Image (cartoon, grey):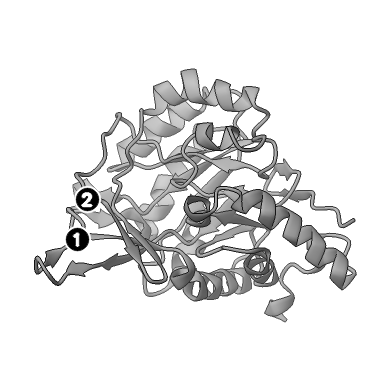
Amino acid sequence: MADLRTVFAGMDLPNPILAASGTYGFGHEFAELYPLTIPGAIMTKGLTLNPSAGNPTPRIAEMPGGMLNSIGLENPGPEAFITAELPWLLSQGARVIANIGGHDLSDYEELGRIMSHGNGLTAVEVNISCPNLAEGGMAFGVDPVLASQAVRLVKKHVKVPVIAKLTPNVTDIVLIAKAVAAEGADCISLINTLLGMAIDINTRRPILARKVGGLSGPAVKPVALRMVWEVARAVDMPIIGMGGVMSAQDAVEFILAGACAVAVGTANLINPYSIPEIIEGLGVWLDSQGYKSTDEIRGLALQ
């Protein structure tokens, strides 16, 4: 049997298949179906400095190739996570990557300070797709200076690896990746959702209350795969690939493109057993091809 153990950026995981932020909550629903020790790690629901009820409804729209969402980072806040959700996840044997997002640079610094008290965390994922309210709503992730500053402020406080989660809504993903790498990011995860919208032809109005939302699911996989491949060619640092991963074959493609690990998102909402099935399928594929680990195939498509 192939060995799925994956070591990168200071993280030692039993396999490279992770639960993507925003699609797995804090694991409670999935714990009723299978042990939370199965995913390589769980990337938690995004945490903001203050608890948030999220955006008004409707905030989800199903698309032919995936879904649009405008949830708006509904979450209980970082203190509730540290005192309640994290201890519970750790009691289940999960490896936990806390996802955080701010609306100005001071938010990121304070979130980093709070996460420094998260005993048992595997890593912190910094969501830089959030709108920077101090700059008129422009997302941190579209500006290399803002993106790198957010990462630097979190890195200043936490002792665990810091993962920079990049937005695809840019003209040059490599520029952003190089900027966060220069400020000390230990790893890059990409991609976050693509900005999109849907219109109801009967009401003649956008379906989502906030008009636009993030597109995820199979439709975004070719874009995500291309961006992982581009970044892997240009930046010498670990990458977590995500975007439209529905099967073991999809996971293999991301690893061939240079990813050290692969996060599963929208698939969890369609088939809650997606992660264990993809882990099993990855092992079967490696065995069938005569590979002993994912290390042997990582980046082969870069050559």
Residue denoted by label 2: 58
Q: Given the current orientation, which residue lies at the most extreme front position? A: 202
- Image coordinates of residue 52 in percent, x first then y, are 28, 33
**Residue farthest along the bottom direction in this orientation:** 303
Question: SS at mark 2?
Answer: loop
269 lies above or below 76: below
Residue 143 visible to the viewer? no
Q: In the visual, does 110 lie left or right of 82?
A: left
The label shown at residue 207 is 1
Residue at 66% in and 44% down: 39
Note whether residue 107 is visible. yes
Residue placed most toward the observer, 250 or 11: 250
Q: Which amino acid does label 2 sit on?
A: Pro
Q: Quick one: label 2 or label 1, which is nearer the N terminus? A: 2
Q: Nearer the viewer, residue 19 or 131?
A: 19
- Report whether 141 appears left or right of 1: left
Classify the position of the C terminus by image quarter. bottom right
Mark 1 element type: loop
Task: Give the number of callouts.
Answer: 2
Residue 104 percent coordinates (x, y): 28, 42
Q: Do the residues labelled 2 and 1 touch (CB within 8 Å)?
A: yes
Q: Which residue is drawn at 51% across and 35% down?
A: 29
